[in-house]
Amino acid sequence: MAEGFQEIPKNTWKNFLQKHWKMALVIAAGIACAVVGAIAVFLWRTTGPEALVRYPPTLGLWTVGYLVSLLVDLILWGLLLIVLPIIAAAICIYFLWWKRIPAGERQEYFGGPREKRPRRRARRGSAGGIFNIFVFITWLIIIGADGNWSKAFGLWTFSYLVISVLAAFLWDLLIIAIPVTIAFIWWVRRK
């Protein structure tokens, strides 16, 4: 049962990144562009000129129908402008780059046939909850700094709500991304 099993060395992915660093940078830049594009599409569909005409300006006038319409609109435009180009880019990368890597080298990264082990049930963690709490605290700080702490929700504009929540998310993402990027670069460069 374990005859065909090949253990993957611990530094295999580090070697992969060092050997194919140019393509790794292209893929990282593509992911960054996709995230920026997704944020731009989100802002365009929620706070752009057409959204100002289609949806009520204040939160006190919103209904479930408006919310469903906005969600469907975001999903369809996100699929068209973000997901389909990502799929096309992934197909191009696969056929133009990954298939050109020798089969032996590709096999090295993914190892041989895996031995069958009993599956363990994955535990559902709550790690996303911690990030959500940080985003919420940052959002409260932004609300307080903007002077809307005592203002009723019904008087808020929808654009303000969207931009303030997105700003809180991006600030926390930036705070987390800087040390993660430094640690990743240190890990790759370490001998």
Image (cartoon, rainbow, N blue to C red):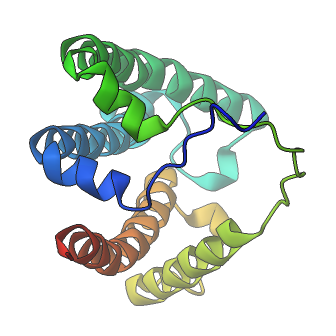
Question: Residue 60 versus residue 82: which sits nearer the camera?
Answer: 82
Q: In which quarter of the image is residue 151?
A: bottom right
The residue depicted at 21 percent of the width and 77 percent of the height is 190
Quarter of the image with the C terminus in it? bottom left
Q: Which residue is drawn at 61% across and 31% down?
A: 71
Q: Where is residue 80 in the image (x, y as percent from the top left)?
A: 40, 15
Image: 53 above or below 140: above
Toward the viewer: 35 or 31?
31
Q: How many marks?
A: 0
Residue 52 appearing in the image: no
Q: Left of 94 or right of it: where is 68?
A: right
At x 48%, y 87%, the residue is 141
Where does the image place residue 28, in percent across and percent down from the top left? Answer: 24, 46
Q: Hey, which residue is sitting farthest left in the picture?
A: 22
| Picture layout, residue 92 above or below residue 117 | above
Q: Which of 79 and 9 is in front in this view?
A: 9
The quadrant the N terminus occupies is top right
Using the image as rendered, state which of residue 161 and residue 57 is in the foreground: 161
Quadrant in the picture for residue 72: top right
Q: Which residue is drawn at 80% across and 36% down?
A: 116
User: x, y percentage for residue 173?
Assistant: 40, 69
The spot of residue 22 in percent (x, y) is: 9, 42
